[in-house]
Image (cartoon, rainbow, N blue to C red):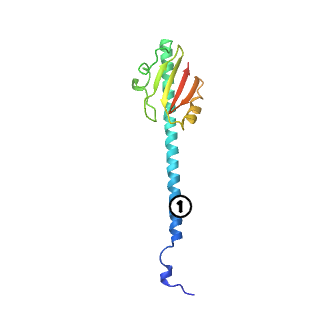
């Protein structure tokens, strides 16, 4: 049996749908990968910011012997004497809570807070940390 030239031209609807389904899966997976990579980068940046604030607090404690004066404007050991911002927007705030304790508050999406908290709490100097509504409270005990 010979097929006519007309029956061999073009693609079927099934073939078009298959190509579109594969393209949609590739696009969805690319978007998920980008979001995951972006969140991981922001978590790393937030962890670096908290670590730098803790180091600045240690420097203040070494210089003055107390952390009661620690405040947003009283951490001269940070780069450019400026408090870092949260990677998710908004400033980080630091308040001295006692002679050897201060608190860091930073904006963070509620969904990402538990994974960030698990990384932050690996630091032995942290006494308590907790997730709030779109924020995290880190209490540093020197």
User: Residue 13: percent from the left, percent from the top?
Assistant: 51, 71
Determine which residue is flagged by label 1: 22
User: Residue 17: percent from the left, percent from the top?
Assistant: 52, 66
Residue closest to the far left: 80
Which residue is more in the foreground, 142 or 32?
32
Task: Give the position of the C terminus as an image quadrant.
Answer: top right
Image vertical order of residue 141 relative to residue 122, above or below: above
The residue located at (57%, 26%) in the rendering is 129
User: Residue 56: percent from the left, percent from the top?
Assistant: 48, 22
The residue located at (48%, 25%) in the rendering is 53
Residue closest to the far front: 133
Which residue is more in the foreground, 61 or 72?
72
Task: Give the position of the N terminus as an image quadrant.
Answer: bottom right
User: Residue 73: percent from the left, percent from the top?
Assistant: 41, 20
The residue located at (59%, 33%) in the rendering is 118
Image vertical order of residue 54 relative to residue 119, above or below: above
The residue located at (60%, 24%) in the rendering is 124
Residue closest to the far top: 65
| Numbered-mark total | 1
Q: Secondary structure at mark 1?
A: helix
Neighbourhood count class around disc 1 (C-alpha, 10 Å): few under 14, some 14–19, many 20 upward: few
């Amino acid at each position: 049996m010979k097929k006519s030239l007309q029956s061999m031209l073009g693609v079927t609807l099934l073939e078009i749908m298959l190509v579109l389904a594969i393209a949609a899966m590739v696009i969805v997976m690319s978007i998920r990968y980008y979001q995951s990579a972006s969140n991981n980068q922001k978590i790393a940046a937030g962890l670096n910011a908290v670590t730098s604030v803790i180091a600045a607090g240690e420097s203040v404690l070494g210089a003055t012997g107390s952390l009661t004066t620690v405040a947003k404007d009283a951490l001269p050991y940070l780069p450019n004497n400026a408090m870092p911002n949260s990677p998710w927007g908004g400033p980080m705030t630091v308040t001295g809570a006692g002679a050897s304790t201060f608190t860091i508050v930073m904006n963070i999406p509620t969904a990402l807070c538990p994974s960030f908290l698990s990384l932050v709490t690996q630091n032995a100097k942290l006494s308590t940390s907790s997730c709030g509504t779109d924020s995290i409270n880190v209490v540093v005990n020197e």
